[in-house]
Image (cartoon, rainbow, N blue to C red):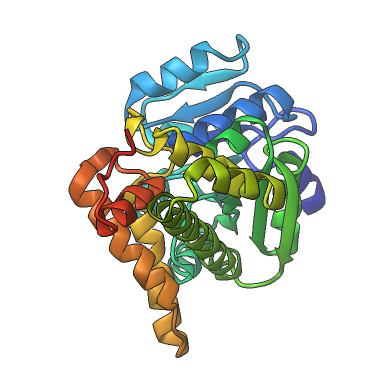
Amino acid sequence: MDSIKQTLGVGGSSGNSPRLAWVGLGNMGRGMVKNLVEKGSYAAPLAIYNRTTARAEKLASTLPSGKTKVVTSIEDAVSQADIIFTCVGDDKAITDTIDTALKSPDAKGKLFVDCSTIHPDTSNKLAETINNAGAEFVACPVFGAPAMADNGQLVCVLAGPAAQVARVKPFCKGVMGRAEIDFSDQPHGTATRLKIIGNTFILNMVETLSEGHTLAEKSGLGSDNLHQFIETMFPGPYTAYSTRMRQGDYYKRDEPLFNVDLARKDARHALSLAESSGAKMKAVEVADGHLEMVQKHMGSKGDIAGIYGAVRQEGGLKFENE
């Protein structure tokens, strides 16, 4: 009987497909929901909650009829699902979200899957809180830019009890992502620890590109010539960020792809993790200083790629490469 309940999902889903809910619709969340709806196997409709209801309604209007349902509270999302995915901005937001969700009388027995980028200590605390409430938890942060989320090309990192991870994996590779990193039966914070350290690679990549393009311009090589080298040697993310810098996308966007506030949050987590481990991350310290300059120059519209503008300023150039 327990195995049957596990397959169906506690809460009474129909057939072999669990009922799903999604909480949080940032740049990444929208693409992940899109792929869940288009490729996932679940008992429709998928309940969608976002603090701004209009954003959830706008997304739902672009998806196949009958596959989603917009709900107006976290409690409604919990009551209508067996598996509740969350993807929010920071540690406080996910802690508040889970605290609210667990107030629902329907929370017991549900599986919560968090895709947020948070400190590993927060993940472990969430697991304890959720388990104490009689529910289950899997940490599932993802690697990839919003465009990769839209195209189902994310890399999903899963940690938690193997039986619960197995319930989440059908929605990862081939649906929301192109690959999985499986940390079954390891502490939940293992997944977010990898996510935090992995994000420093992205931060340092943007820092390196920013310094390289600025030096190329200042030394007479020119950004176009440097970009040819980057395209040839480093196709993929390096070329994509190099293109954004050359085209001025780092300051022209109305909505950032990787918000500077969130990038600084990730940097703080990495530096905190390093300090507690007795390690140093000097490159992250430098990049975070440039992110602070981006915050001052662009405010809430600041993007991680704006590091290029900060490095340009340090080199005596304008922030914008007009």
Q: Residue furthest bottom?
A: 278
> Height in image: 111 above or below 118?
above
**Which residue does the image show at 39% across and 65% down from the upper left?**
267
Q: In the shown orientation, is residue 169 left or right of residue 123?
A: right
User: Number of marks in the image?
Assistant: 0
Q: Quick check: can you spot residue 276?
A: yes
Could you say which is closer to the camera, residue 34 or residue 269?
269
Picture coordinates of residue 291, whole percent (x, y): 31, 56
Give the residue displayed 52% in from the left and 44% down from the top: 242
- Along the line of sight, the residue nearer the viewer: 57 or 206: 206
Image spot of residue 273 (x, y percent) = 44, 77
Q: Residue at x 80, y 45 (%)?
A: 4
Q: Residue furthest front?
A: 220
Q: Is residue 129 left or right of residue 192?
A: left
- The image quadrant where one finds the C terminus is top left
> Does 55 appear above or below 117?
above
In the image, residue 143 lies at what x, y percent? 60, 51
Residue 79 in view in this figure: no
Query: Which residue appears at 56% of the width and 19% of the height?
Result: 68
Which residue is farthest left?
A: 296
Q: Is residue 62 above or below residue 313?
A: above
Report the front residue among 46 and 141. Answer: 141
The percent position of residue 176, horizontal first and vertical second, equals 67, 38
Which residue is nearer to you in this view: 220 or 252? 220
Q: Is residue 282 left or right of residue 41?
A: left
